[in-house]
């Protein structure tokens, strides 16, 4: 079970959240002008990286707010959380190969400040 | 319950050759699909100067981790055709491969728990019959007769309101299936190369001409991708994208019990599917974890929910103990149907997207994908499962039949 | 059913009539709650029909200031509870709050809390919604209350962390619920009405072990 550091509420069990898939996928400005290929990319294609993934989560049984998260899809290490509408932070350094000190959400590389409510974080 | 005994198997079923510098075709991924593809390339198309490259050990991915349910009762014509073809192959493969991999046609039930389920199931039974797939609708009493340990009382949260039943469906011993294919491949001259990770592709313009591996570069005329959960990673190396998301999918077994469960029971609604393996352990699968994951592990609450559902349906399981849980990496598509066909890269072909339910498809995937790799064009059975369908809109939505997993 | 014996039609004034017509979500468990409670160890009861109002307003907005004036403040962050006298405001989200007040504060019984909140919001962006029928209230109290909750709630409930006067929206027994610690050993749990029976029975089950002597 993931321990997810909600930017508003602090660390909570994964069961309090819902997953929203890849973050920063804008709705096309002019859908009618897209080719079938471009439209299919928007509808069906998302990144599926082995490693750092930028994704959306919503704290359904807590503050009900969406936020973004950088998570490693292999170690499941949560590297950063940040508000909706804010650009993706630079990817933290990949974990050093042999140190074997996988950090948990609580010791994430981008310190979380639960006191700061994210601007623009709406459902 | 089968009265067969587990066959003794010899120490070595295939050689462990060094990779050659070039092959006529290279198959990436030594799971069930990669091995079946190599088998049919050699058998049906006479292509024996080929290699299967596996980054770990043979069939150590989803092939080692699935709950082995085999059935063909899918809704749409395209799916019924390919899955039913697979089922017919399952029926002859033990003889053809000269290997008793304990294919047991003990029947599969898909429970209905709501009126919506009931309507969808009865519709599917009708569609199945039109496609020559053996399918029946059972009322709760008939469900109980076939599987006496099922709780059909109506005082549970999701009572059993009936079930679809496919008598010819069942289970098989997954690792023996892999070994059976591997042995035949090896006999026909196919090189099965383990501990050989593909790390990149050599291209001449838009055409693939070789693969880079952890054991050196290999030239090849053709590449077939059979990497299941890692398909997106390989596609990216080759310079294209797939409409795939990789998720953890988990399963578990209990300790051994006397035969108590004579068939296979699946419930999409409460996310559980159960059979009893030949040795006696109860094998149960869960639903996928919501997030993308390559970790071969998922979250414990998924297991917990699955067990809660299983105990409600099978009260006697309350006394069983979990022996082991594990996870695989499943390659899901948005229409719950596989992708078997050409790619934007010339001479590179892809077989993926079987997601939570590709074990049953193994023989047909192998047969049709071998045809595609050998001839450069899809077989009529895999033609509808092209990558283009995401552009043309000709999706094959099997969420009703494939729903949770299996 | 005993609770409904005072027929709505026999009530004298409209307020009494309204109250008598209400059915609490866990009324069928009232006796079981009594039988399962262990005086001095852990006790469970339903506090039905508290007035609850869902309030939404952006922090720092003028509407928020006006609403805060009615309730005696709006809580600033997760866990915080603001309020004044009988009226408490629980933080649910950055712009979402739950106002909890006694039964009599309800409009149908002549209370003026909800109209006052509605007036405070005026035409501004936000919400004032009567949610009194959405959730019911359980009170769990006694030296074992925390241990009972810990069986199904993964928050850190140790008094060093979870102080009286804080509240969280979280999961208890796998269902969503608001948990408010109102005293050193007293908790209020707000399940949605449709989950009340489930949570009530779950709590009773979790309390049961304390009826037996402790195994040393
Ligand atoms: C828990 C679980 C339960 C399931 N239950 C069922 C079921 O009941 N019925 C059913 O029909 N299906 C089921 N499935 C699905 C089924 O297991 C898969 O669809 C199927 O096994 C996929 O094909 P495969 O056997 O070739 O995959 P895999 O065995 O995963 O083979 C892919 C191989 O590719 C290798 N590979 C990856 N990247 C590289 C690389 N770069 N270089 C070289 N090799 C690479 C991997 O190591 C792996 O061995 C289940 C899956 C899981 C996880
Ligand atoms: Zn939160």
Image: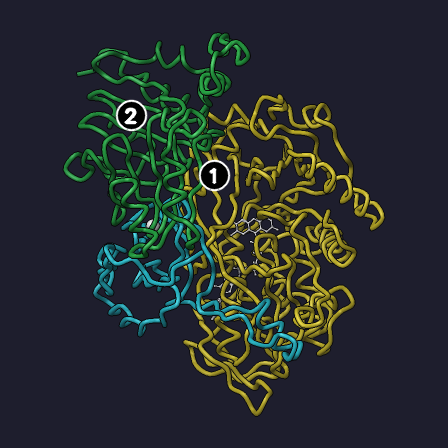
Chain colours: A cyan, B yellow, C green
Residue B313: x and y in percent read 56, 28
Picture quadrant where residue C27 is located = top left
Give coordinates of residue C123: x percent, y percent. 44, 52
Residue at the disc numbered 1: B253
Marks 2 and 1 sit apart, C-alpha to C-alpha, by 31 Å
Q: Is residue B42 visible?
A: no
Looking at this rendering, what residue extends furthest in the right direction?
B130
B210 sits left or right of C211 in the view: right
> Residue C39's x, y, as percent?
24, 11
Image quarter for residue B149? top right
Identify the element where label 2 is drawn: helix
Question: In the current view of this chain or complex, which residue is farthest to the left?
Answer: C160
The residue under the point 61% across, 48% down is B403
- Is B89 placed above or below B287 here? below
The residue to which callout 2 is attached is C148
Nearer to me, C13 or B283: C13
Could one spot residue A87 in this view of the protein?
Answer: yes
């Amino acid at each position: 079970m993931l321990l997810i550091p909600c930017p508003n509420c602090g660390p909570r069990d994964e069961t309090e959240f819902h997953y929203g898939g890849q973050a920063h996928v804008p709705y096309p400005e002019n859908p009618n002008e897209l080719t079938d290929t471009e439209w299919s990319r928007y509808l069906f294609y998302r990144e599926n990286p082995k490693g750092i993934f930028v994704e959306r989560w919503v704290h359904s049984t807590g503050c009900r707010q969406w936020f973004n998260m950088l998570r490693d899809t292999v170690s499941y290490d949560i590297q950063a959380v940040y508000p909706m509408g804010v650009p993706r932070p630079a990817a933290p350094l990949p974990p050093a190969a042999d140190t074997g000190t996988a950090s948990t959400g609580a010791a994430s590389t981008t310190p979380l400040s639960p006191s700061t409510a994210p601007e623009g974080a709406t459902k | 319950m089968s009265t067969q005994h587990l066959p003794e198997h010899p120490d070595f079923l295939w050689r462990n050759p060094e990779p050659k510098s070039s092959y006529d075709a290279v198959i990436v991924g030594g799971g069930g699909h990669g091995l079946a593809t190599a088998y049919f390339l050699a058998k049906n198309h006479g292509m024996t100067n080929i290699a299967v490259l596996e980054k770990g050990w043979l069939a150590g991915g989803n092939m080692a981790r699935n709950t082995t349910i085999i059935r063909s009762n899918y809704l749409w014509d395209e799916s019924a055709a390919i899955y039913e073809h697979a089922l017919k192959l399952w029926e002859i493969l033990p003889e053809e491969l000269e290997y008793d991999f304990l294919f047991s046609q003990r029947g599969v039930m898909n429970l209905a728990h709501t009126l919506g389920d009931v309507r969808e199931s009865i519709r599917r039974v009708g569609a199945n019959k039109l496609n020559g797939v053996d399918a029946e609708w059972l009322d709760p009493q008939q469900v109980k007769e076939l599987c006496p340990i099922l709780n059909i009382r109506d005082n549970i949260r999701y009572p059993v309101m009936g079930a679809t039943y496919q008598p010819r469906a069942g289970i098989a011993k997954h690792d023996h299936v892999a070994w059976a294919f591997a042995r035949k491949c090896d006999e026909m001259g196919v090189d099965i190369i383990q501990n050989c990770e593909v790390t990149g592709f050599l291209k001449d313009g838009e055409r693939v001409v070789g693969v880079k591996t952890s054991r050196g570069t290999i030239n090849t005329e053709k590449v077939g991708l059979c990497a299941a959960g890692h398909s997106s990673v390989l596609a990216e190396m080759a310079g294209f994208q797939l409409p795939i998301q990789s998720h953890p999918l988990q399963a578990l077994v209990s300790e051994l019990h006397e035969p108590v469960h004579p068939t296979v029971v699946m419930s999409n609604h409460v996310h559980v599917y159960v059979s009893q393996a030949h040795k006696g352990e109860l094998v149960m699968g869960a639903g996928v974890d919501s997030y993308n994951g390559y970790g071969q592990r998922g979250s414990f609450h998924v297991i917990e929910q699955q067990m809660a559902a299983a105990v409600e349906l099978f009260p006697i399981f309350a006394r069983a103990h979990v022996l082991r849980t594990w996870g695989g990496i499943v390659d899901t598509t948005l229409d719950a149907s596989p992708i078997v066909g050409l790619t934007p890269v010339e001479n590179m072909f892809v077989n993926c997207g079987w997601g939570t339910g590709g074990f049953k498809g193994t023989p047909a995937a192998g047969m049709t994908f071998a045809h595609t790799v050998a001839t450069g064009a899809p077989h009529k059975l895999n033609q509808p499962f092209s990558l283009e369908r995401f552009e043309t809109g000709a999706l094959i939505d099997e969420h009703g039949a494939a729903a949770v997993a299996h | 059913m005993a609770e409904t014996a005072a027929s709505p039609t026999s009530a004298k004034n409209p307020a009494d009539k309204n109250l008598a017509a209400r059915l609490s979500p866990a009324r069928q468990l009232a006796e079981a709650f009594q039988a399962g409670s262990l005086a001095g160890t852990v006790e469970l009861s339903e506090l039905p029909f508290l007035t609850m109002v869902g309030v939404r307003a952006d922090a720092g907005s003028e509407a928020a200031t006006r609403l805060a004036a009615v309730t005696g403040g709006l809580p600033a962050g997760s866990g915080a509870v603001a309020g004044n006298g009988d009226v408490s405001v629980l933080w649910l989200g950055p712009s979402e709050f739950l106002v909890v007040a006694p039964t009599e504060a309800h409009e149908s019984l002549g209370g003026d809390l909800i109209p006052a909140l509605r007036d405070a919001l005026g035409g501004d962006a936000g919400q004032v919604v009567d949610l009194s029928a959405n959730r019911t209230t359980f009170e769990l109290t006694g030296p074992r209350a925390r241990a009972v909750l810990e069986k199904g709630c993964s928050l850190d409930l140790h008094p060093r962390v979870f102080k009286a006067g804080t509240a969280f929206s979280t999961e208890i027994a796998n269902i969503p619920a608001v948990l408010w610690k109102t005293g050193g050993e007293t908790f209020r749990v707000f399940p949605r009405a449709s989950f009340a029976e489930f949570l009530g029975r779950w709590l009773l089950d979790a309390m049961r072990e304390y009826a037996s002597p402790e195994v040393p």
